[in-house]
Amino acid sequence: MWILGIDTSCDDTGVGLVRDGEVVVNLVAGQVALHEAYGGVVPELASREHLKVLRPLAERALAEAGIGPKDLSLVAATRGPGLIGALLVGYTFAKGLAWALGRPFYAVHHLEAHIAAAWPEGLEPPFLALVASGGHTHLFEVRALGRYRLLGATRDDAAGEAFDKVARLLGLGFPGGPEIERLAEGAEEAVPFPVPLRGQEGYEFSFSGLKTKALHLVERGLPGPALARGFQEAAIAHLAEVVLRAARDTGHRVLLVAGGVAANRALQGRFREAGLEVHFPPKGLSQDNGAMVALAAWRRHRAGFPPSPLSLGATPYWPLEEA
Ligand code: ATP
Ligand code: FE
């Protein structure tokens, strides 16, 4: 069974093809150069670029898989959350395709897709899932597919956003996560950063203090590599402390780490030594992509969830607990 998955929630056009739960093709067209001059994603430009890129990208994905549209059994797209104009491009394209082909359509929650990318075949809930990305730092208890309890989230910046902002302070490119990671790996020492919310109870996160600290250190002229490493270590320590406290309190011994920040090797190392069973997305599936959307739809279909009505609209705001 072939499933086409599309994600256009932000500034990446993602088209993925999944066959019986296996990722066969996963194409992502980024827009970094388009938004570079503005210091952030310009929603209208993002939407227009998706519009231009999506159809050829979908055609290329089918060609790479050696199949035609009629071979698709299901079509899926991210419904939200995200930039509404950007979402509408992929979501409407997918609905139109499903309708034209007479195939079921699945409206997918972007965070469920991130979680699906890290969820190994055969692993049964319940478990904990940390989504750490450009727009989210959310810790969930996954009770079942489609049944999520939010344990805690960031009070301010998302983890990936903090990596991006600190990278900008250091004059590095976007996205900042891989740049910070590269710089930190070459550092001989680390400038100490205080770990946010250390010693507090609860499962909230905070990254804005690290960003402010980085700004002060940059102004004092401290070396970039040591600063990048100090920031990265504190950010990872913070994520690990909150998640391990939640694991201790809830008794869960299994953890998924999903979203763009999950690609960070130092972070993976820290969580791997935490004494839990930890799963990360395979390479290429942590950042936004279409395959993760198809994987989420595959899980929903297999679990007997009904397809989504074509009358259902995209939505910029959609808590995962309501998915
Ligand atoms: P959301 O999923 O919350 O809507 P998003 O889709 O923009 O946000 P993703 O594509 O999942 O986010 O992740 C992008 C983020 O991941 C960026 O902030 C980027 O800096 C960060 N990131 C990517 N690679 C790394 C890395 N190696 N280390 C740390 N952060 C990383
Ligand atoms: Fe994302």
Image (spheres, rainbow, N blue to C red):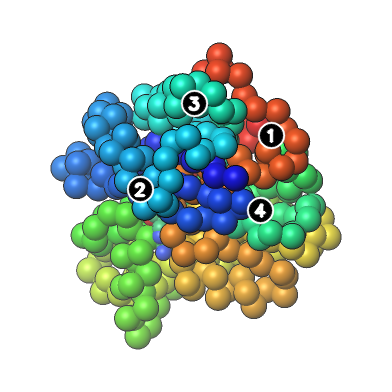
Q: Earlier in the sequence, mark 4 or mark 1?
A: 4
Give the camera-side residue of 198 and 240.
240
Q: Earlier in the sequence, mark 2 or mark 4?
A: 2
Q: Are marks 3 and 2 in contact (CB under 8 Å)?
A: no
Secondary structure beneath label 4: strand
Picture residue at 71% right of the left edge, 54% below the top: 128
Picture coordinates of residue 95, whole percent (x, y): 48, 24
Q: Which residue is mark 2?
A: 63
Q: Earlier in the sequence, mark 3 or mark 1?
A: 3
On screen, residue 249 versus residue 294, left or right, reads right
Q: Which residue is mark 1?
A: 321
Q: Are marks 2 and 4 in contact (CB under 8 Å)?
A: no
- Disc 2 marks which amino acid? Ala
Residue 129 badge: 4
Q: Is mark 1 within 8 Å of ligand 1?
A: no
Looking at the image, can residue 135 be seen?
no
Q: Is mark 2 within 8 Å of ligand 1?
A: no
Picture coordinates of residue 79, whole percent (x, y): 51, 29
Picture coordinates of residue 106, whole percent (x, y): 58, 31
